[in-house]
Amino acid sequence: MAKLLITGCSGQVGRFIVRKLVSEGIDFSGLDINFNQNIPDIDFFEIDLTKKFHLKEIKTRLEEYNTVLHLASYTDAYRDVTKYGIPSIDLNITGTLNLLEFLPNLEHFCFASSYLVYGKPNSNLVSEVHRTEPVNIYGSSKLIMEKFLQVYAKKKCISLGILRFMGIYGLENPYALQAIPLFIKAIAQNQTPMVYGDGKARRNHIHIDDAVNAFFAWLKEKKNGIFNIGGPETVNNIELINLIILYMKKKIEFTFKDSEQEQYDFISDISKSQKDLGFIPTIGIKDGIRKAISTYTQVEKNHV
């Protein structure tokens, strides 16, 4: 019987999807380079997608799957292209191509992409038709795969959903390098949070619970197309820090530092995903920050 395969199932986003799939009794298998104890006991393949011989070993099993959520990715967005370009290409591009070769019965494919494919926006609200000019390795590798998958899907007559996520927060990684977890960690440890630039650039970050629901919205509809996925509200870094200080009941000042990277507003237009997928984000920034602080506190407690 054809069923669902999720790659990157042990990752920071994948583990949340796995938990929801299990709770809803959906038949699926997971694939990742390592098994993470933070996910339930599932039908799991420990596979390195960059090693084609690993996939050959489970060739018969892979014939079972007609639907794939593809999250496996090398996620270091802003690192030196000369040092980190090859691992990014290996997993994000070669790994995806290897996987597709061993999915003969594929009908539906969902690719977890990123707002970073757009680069610097030229409008206040960025829709899916905005030009794509990524400025880092991660965004570039995602865009390359988007283009390849569009050609592949058309040739193979499969439905392809490309979900371009804004920055996802509320994850279980206290060492993440995105703004929100860095701010939470610094303030929790009574350190001075650093604001790059003037701190006024706005984003509609998305909480992990809403991000998971976006994948489930696509699974329900399985529609072709590119879909922006973002949160329901915008916020800047100064507002974020003040919220975290308030909710953590701290008395901490923050400092400003010149940024090597240009700071600008990036607000993702999610009206298409709302209309075509029925995706409605429900976690505003205040509730999201409370949840993120709670998650960070629990993870730190478990590490002690």
Image (cartoon, helix red, strand yellow):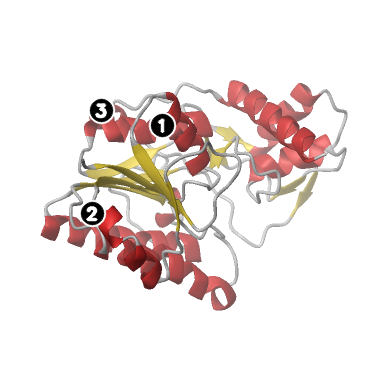
> Which residue is depicted at the point 39% across and 51% down?
113
Q: Do the residues labelled 1 and 3 touch (CB within 8 Å)?
A: no
- Amino acid on which disc 1 is placed: Leu
Separation of marks 2 and 3 at Cα, in angstroms: 33 Å
**x, y (%) of residue 176?**
65, 49
Could you say whether the residue bearing mark 1 is in a helix, strand or loop?
helix
**Residue at image coords 54%, 48%:** 264
Q: Percent position (x, y) of residue 244?
A: 73, 29
- Give the mark nearer the N terminus: 2 vs 3: 2
Does 62 sit left or right of 235 as displayed? left
What's the residue type where badge 2 is placed?
Glu
Q: Mark 3 points at which residue?
A: 275
Determine the CA span between mark 1 and mark 3: 24 Å
Of circles 1 and 2, the one toward us is 2
Rendered image: mark on residue 21:
1
Say which of marks 2 and 3 sits in front.
2
What's the amino acid at mark 3? Lys
Does residue 196 sit above or below 1 in this rendering? below
- Residue 115, given in percent of the width and then of the height, sits at 43, 49
